[in-house]
Image: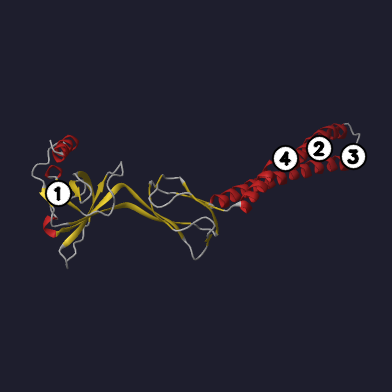
Amino acid sequence: MTRFGVFLIVMSTLFGSDVVGAIDLHDADCVIEPHVTVDLSTAVDGIVEEALVDRGDVVRAGQVLVKLESGVEKSAVAQARLRVNQTSEMDLAQGRLIFARKKLERTMQLFQDNVISEFAKDEVELEVEVAELEVRQATELRERAELDLQRALEILKLRTIVSPIDGVVVERLVAKGEAIGEQQTVLLKLAQIDPLNVELIVPVEDFGPIHVGAVLTVRPGFPVDGSFAAKIDIVDPIIDASSGTFGVRAILPNPGLEIPAGLSCTASLDPATN
């Protein structure tokens, strides 16, 4: 059995009917393109410490691609973390408050026994209020230090450029030791090729049968051999009057990255999905 025959059986199993009698779209312009392309840039200036990928490399979302020198930022993080971990000021303020409250308990007893004056009692009450203010101040300083640490960590994070997508590196525009600034905004160009977009420009005569969710049989050009199923994702609702055509996009799974983007193709519509 030919590969296309196997494909017809698979399509029948997946979509509940066979694809015999498919509507050819040979008059349509058809090209296979990346699903997403990204010009990866950075919001900060700096010197490239490491460029960890090169053209053609497969990358994963979250993977580190470029590192900028970050000695100053790491030092800022260390200082901010030290301030967060310092507990002496808070411990001292809390100790003073505990002592002031115990002193107030004794003072109130003495005042009730008419041993001390009201003025002496008021002095001790004021000491408690001051101690409470010191604890509040130490708490606010601790919270501010935690915010400073979070800010320092975010600034440090900007020195590491990660991939936003699963894809491949199309072009690397920086190298180790290169300065990054206003003149160099794009570091890498990435493309997601799983899935792929099948972009078609279709004659208006075929507008009726084509709809979102319908399945296309896509045959890439050389050097890829075989036929593949792609589900229509977009049908342009506006027809170009000058050319008598409309645009269609189908999504073509490419888990093994065997189909390169940029190929021309032909397509036919499975009538069973109409």
Please provide percent x and percent y for residue 33.
28, 53
- Using the rendered view, name the quadrant where residue 236 is placed: bottom left
Q: Which residue is mark 3?
A: 117
Tell me the kind of residue under disc 2. Ala
Tell me the kind of residue under disc 4. Thr
The Cα atoms of the two marked residues, 3 and 2, are separated by: 18 Å
Which element type, helix, strand or loop, lies under badge 4? loop
Q: What mark, if any, has residue 268 been given in the picture?
A: 1
Describe residue 249's horizontal placement relative to residue 166 as left or right.
left
If the image is split into quadrants, where does the C terminus sit? top left
Label 4 or label 1, whichever comes before in sequence order: 4
Which element type, helix, strand or loop, lies under badge 1? strand
Describe residue 155's horizontal placement relative to residue 263 as left or right.
right
Please provide percent x and percent y for residue 10.
18, 36
Q: Which residue is mark 4?
A: 87
Pick out the residue farthest to the front: 223
The Cα atoms of the two marked residues, 1 and 3, are separated by: 101 Å
Q: What mark, if any, has residue 15 been given in the picture?
A: none
- Using the rendered view, name the quadrant where residue 61 is placed: top left
Around disc 3, counting alpha carbons within 10 Å, would you say few (fewer than 14), some (14 to 19), or many (20 or more)? few
